[in-house]
Every structure is written in structure tokens, then in C-alpha cells.
Image: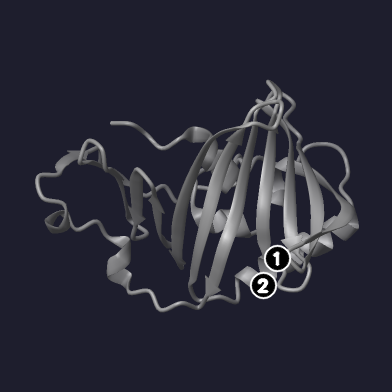
Amino acid sequence: MKKILPLFLLVFSFSMAWAQSGPGSSDPEAKKILDAVTAKFKTYSTVKASFTFQVEDANGKVQGTKTGTAYLKGDQYKVELTDQEIFCDGKTVWTYDKASNEVQVSKFDASENSFTPQKAFTNFYDKDFLYKLNDEKKQGGKTLQEIELTPTDKGKAFFKILAYVDKLSKNIVSTKLFEKNGSRYVYNVTSFTPNAKIDNSAFTFDAKKYPGVEVIDLR
């Protein structure tokens, strides 16, 4: 089974290492903005967010693009990609590969080291990064605040992430990860709908809807 691109998860979850904070200091102004992002996200009962994920080489040439939609509700989530769907009801995770018509079933890992899309919008920054506020940018009528994050663990494959926050809505709209080998990974939120009506059944894989699916139970 072709697994979801690890670097997609890395960017989408802002490298969910969640280790203890390392030495150094961060920009208090940047922290105020990131704290506001976390506080705003926690007021939503649900979130529906469409996104693009783009891979660039060292010269900025696009090597590939994925599109998708994430549905979030409490500990539950669903991520729809071009070639995959991931379901989680807070207890079980189903990873479905469209090309092979195969689904892997595993237990949900509730530890701090696990990936969930929810972590992409909350206080990911306090544990594993130093951060500073850069200049503001204008994009499509929005004012974006650019925050630069650098990992405290210098052994990581990447050396910098730029996160762009809509100054008005306090939502993260884009991130860009820079690898040491020159590759860049860009994640853009193309639409963001808070408090959307999402039924709990959306977070459970229903084999009846996937005729002939092969189920690989890893629990």
C-alpha cells in the first residue's frame, strides 16, 4: 500500500515532534499572534478546510501538487486527498488507498507525538521551535503576518518554516517548509469554514461504500 507522503504530514502538522522546549528565546510579538491563532481555533466546534500541498525544488520550480480537504470535530478528523482518504473517530484510524482499493486499520494514538490535523492549528510552536515575527505581506486583499519558525533540534532535515497568519481572522492560511537539501514544501489553505455541520458518521470508514476493498487490520 502506498502510504501518505511523510513530508505532507510534516508540513500539515508543522513537524509534530512536540519535544520539550530547547534552549534559546522566541519573539514575544510572534507568540502573541500564535497564541491568538490557538485561542481562535479552540472556539470552533468543527472546521472544514480545503488545501493544496505543493513541492518545489531549490529553484522554486513546482515538482508536484496535491489537493485535499480536512474535516475536524473534537478528536475526530477526516482528510481527503487525491489518492487517499484518512478517517479517525477518536479511537480508530482508517487509511484508504484509492489506487489499490485497500484500507489499513490502526488504533488511534492519543500521545503528544501522534499526528492529527487539529494540531496544525493549535499550539504546535511552544514545544519544538523558536520563532520570530517578520514583515507583513499583502495577498488577495488580506494582510498576512509572517512568522519564521526554526527547529530547536538542528538534526532535523529542515531548517525553517514560514507560517502566514491572516491578521484579521487569526487563522493560519499558508506555511512553507525549507529542507536542507533545497526542497521546499508549501501548504495553502484555500478555504476555511468554521462550525460547519459535520455528522459523526463522516469520521468512520464504511466498507460498504468501497466494494471489494481489502482490509488490513493492524490493531
C-alpha separation, residue under disc 1 versus residue under disc 2: 5 Å
Q: Quadrant of residue 91?
A: bottom left
Numbered tag placed on residue 190 in the rendering: none
Tell me the residue that label 2 is attached to. Answer: 40
Q: Residue drawn at (35%, 43%), measured in percent from left and top?
A: 83
- Locate residue 188 relative to residue 138 in the image: left or right: left
Foreground of the two, 6 or 88: 6
Name which residue type carries label 1.
Val
Of helix, strand and loop, which one carries label 1? helix
Q: Residue furthest top?
A: 181
Give the class, few, some or many, for how many residues have Cα within 10 Å of label 1's Cα (few <14, many ≥20).
Answer: many
Of helix, strand and loop, which one carries label 2? helix
Q: Quadrant of the N terminus?
A: top left
Q: Quadrant of residue 87?
A: bottom left
Q: Residue drawn at (83%, 36%), measured in percent from left and top?
A: 23
Name which residue type carries label 2.
Lys
Numbered tag placed on residue 37 in the rendering: 1
Foreground of the two, 59 or 102: 59
